[in-house]
Image (cartoon, helix red, strand yellow):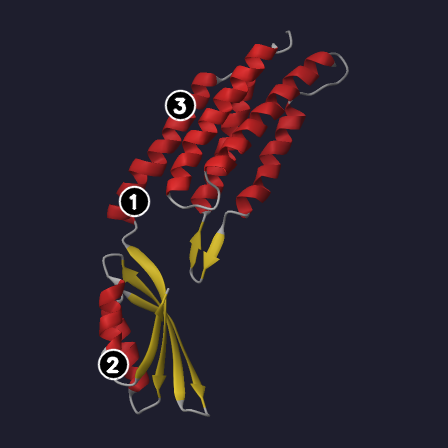
Amino acid sequence: MTEIPLHEIFLRLAAALLAGGAIGFERERDSQPAGLRTHMILALGAALVMILSINIAIDFQGQDAEPTRLAAQVVSGIGFLGAGAILRFGFNVKGLTTASTLWTTAMIGLAIGYGYYLVALFAVVIMLIVLTLVERFEKKFVRINVIRTVVIEVRDREGIIREVRKTISKMSDAVMAFNVQKSLKNKHLRIEIVARFNRSEKLEDMMEVLSAIESVRSIKIE
């Protein structure tokens, strides 16, 4: 087995950039924290590590050189980068898909670095199908609910808490949490509700219904 020639190294690195760019472009359009440049650099680095692993093993043949050791560090190390893409907003967690694409992009980079062009190309095509077509199907038929946090500040009066809870219960599929804080100084209440709503429920309609409740001072919906 001979070393990977220089022109082949350049070809593999360019292919890794294109593969990472294709996936990163989709993530960038979706306004994710890890977008085009992140995926391109990640795929490039993974491919470079794989190329180095092969060439180093060839250079030190017969000296207990294991080409998979260097590449294995990519598999374990990419988890830290993926963790940085995951964000939590109350009960909602965002970035899991992007973290998965980062990890898979690194694996695609390793495959290209080893010379598995067709395998890497197939993986990129499958990923783009999942990120685009499957996402549309998921939004339309699978993920029909969304969890929202509603914070309402009201003037304290008899029956206001019951009225707010009843209104939210009518609009939502299920109330998951209900908290009330009372200010003894100005007799104001802060009501925080976490509920599961149908995705078709518009924020404007929710605001309009809640604003119609007497004594409501402010509304915040996340």
Classify mark 1: helix, strand or loop: helix
| Label 2 crowd bin: few (<14), some (14–19), many (20+), radius 10 Å | some
Measured as percent of width and height from the top left, residue 217 is found at 33, 81
Q: Residue at x 49, y 17 (%)?
A: 116
Foreground: disc 3 or disc 2: 2
Viewer-proximal residue among 179 and 156: 156
The residue tagged 1 is 138
Marks 3 and 1, how far apart at CA: 22 Å
Which of the image's four quarters has the C terminus? bottom left
In this view, the residue farthest toward the right is 63
- Answer with mark 3 or mark 2, whichever residue precedes in sequence: 3
Above/below status of 220 relative to 95: below
Left or right relative to 44: residue 176: left
| Number of the label disc, if any, that sits on residue 213 | 2
Above/below status of 87 relative to 35: below
Above/below status of 5 relative to 207: above
